[in-house]
Each structure stands twice: as C-alpha cells, then as structure tokens.
Amino acid sequence: MKFSYIALFASILSFGSAAPSPKAEGVAALVEPVSTYETDPTKRDPGTKVNVARATKTVTASMLQSLMLNYHNQARAHHGVTALTWNTTLAAAALKSASKCVFAHTANNKYGENIAAGTYTNPAFYAALWYNEGSLYNFSKPGFSEATGHFTQVVWRGTKQLGCAWVKCPGDFPWYLFCEYSPAGNVLPASNFATNVLRSKAAPPNPSQPSGNL
C-alpha cells in the first residue's frame, strides 16, 4: 500500500504556508508560497483548493482529543513549556474547515493553524511529522522558517489551547487533519521566537514516534 503525506502551515499575525521535507518513508510534501503579515490577518492567501467534495467520515471526538493532546503535550514538556488544554470552540472551527475537504488554510482565521492530509490513518503521526521539523530549527538564529513552521507552532510557549478535527475525504490523500491553536504561535517579529521556542530538555524525553496507522 502506498502512503503519502502533504502538509501546510499557517498562524495568525505571522502567516505562512509551508510544507516540511519529512523523513518518513513514502512521504511527499506539497509546498506553497509563504506570505507573512505582522498585523493584518485579512491578507493571508488561503492556499490551494484540492477538491470541494464533502467529508464522509470523522473519528470520535474523544479519541482525537486524547491522541492530539497526548502527543502535543509530550512534545511541549520536552521543551519545558506548559501543557495545552482542549478547547471545543477550536475543535468546532477545525471541523468546519476540515469537513469541506478542501486542502487549504482557513481564510481570515483568528487562530493559529496546522493542517495535513495523507493516507496514514493515525492523526498523531501527522503531529509527529510536524514536531520532527524541530531537527531543522536553528535555535541560535530564532525566527520563522517554511521548513520549521509546524514545529514552532506545536511548541510555542504562548499557546495555551488546542482543538483539532480529523476527517476522511475523497481523493488520493483522504485523511485530513486540521488543528487550531490559541493564542496563535509564530507571531512576528523574530524576537518572539527566542522567548517562545525553547530548546529541548533532557527530561522529560523526546516523545516516541507514533505508528503511521491505527
């Protein structure tokens, strides 16, 4: 069975869309241009539409909440920042966007947002791919990068709440993951990254890599 993965990134106040070059076997990335705006959230390019079919299936809310909070908070603990809590308003916003089955960032979004799509069936695996971008982050030169934008949102110290949606759509990359973050991470200027994206600690350890499929 062929597995593939595509991802984009965006956050409020410092907008961009980026796809990493994931290391997992069989993973492919879709890259879009980055547009960064320091103050105006209305100017973000919402991204490229993939299809307009409606979603046909979602995973249970309780299972998704557990998977995403567990992985995000293990990663955040490894960087010495506080755990996220689940926010049903964020989850509802994520579900509204994901259920359109359009692989594009939410237009005029007031939250931070990471999105992914692929054939892997474990949503936590996509979160791990976001976090794994940290191997490319230059802590000696803090700032936003297309290659590390998902990672910096995941571990952003100022972010306190998370809500995600996971839906199955028609097409070659059927599983869509949308996560909304509040307050948003990746906020310019670059000096904010020095105080919000912290180096990892020896303990607790780096979270283990989830399996690609449940």
Image: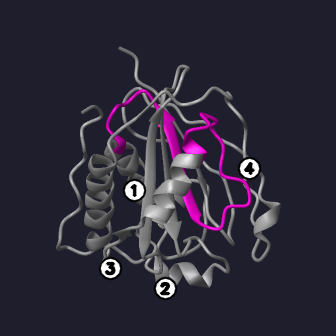
Specify start and end residues of the magenta stretch as a single range: 97-123
Quarter assignment of residue 60 = top left
Helix, strand or loop at label 4? It is loop
| Label 2, residues with CA under 10 Å away: few <14, some 14-19, many ≥20 | few
4 up-or-down from 203: above or below: above
Residue holding disc 1: 131
Helix, strand or loop at label 1? It is helix
Quarter assignment of residue 65 = bottom left
The numbered mark at residue 195 is 2
Amino acid at circle 3: Thr
Helix, strand or loop at label 2? It is helix
Which dot, 4 or 2, sits closer to the camera? 4
Helix, strand or loop at label 3? It is loop
Quarter assignment of residue 84 = bottom left
Nearer the N terminus, badge 3 or badge 1?
3
Residue holding disc 3: 82
**Residue appearing at x 17%, y 74% in the figure:** 203
User: Is 16 a magenta residue?
Assistant: no
Residue 6 percent coordinates (x, y): 53, 36
**Residue 19 in view (yes/no):** no
Nearer the N terminus, badge 1 or badge 4?
4
**Residue appearing at x 50%, y 66% in the figure:** 181
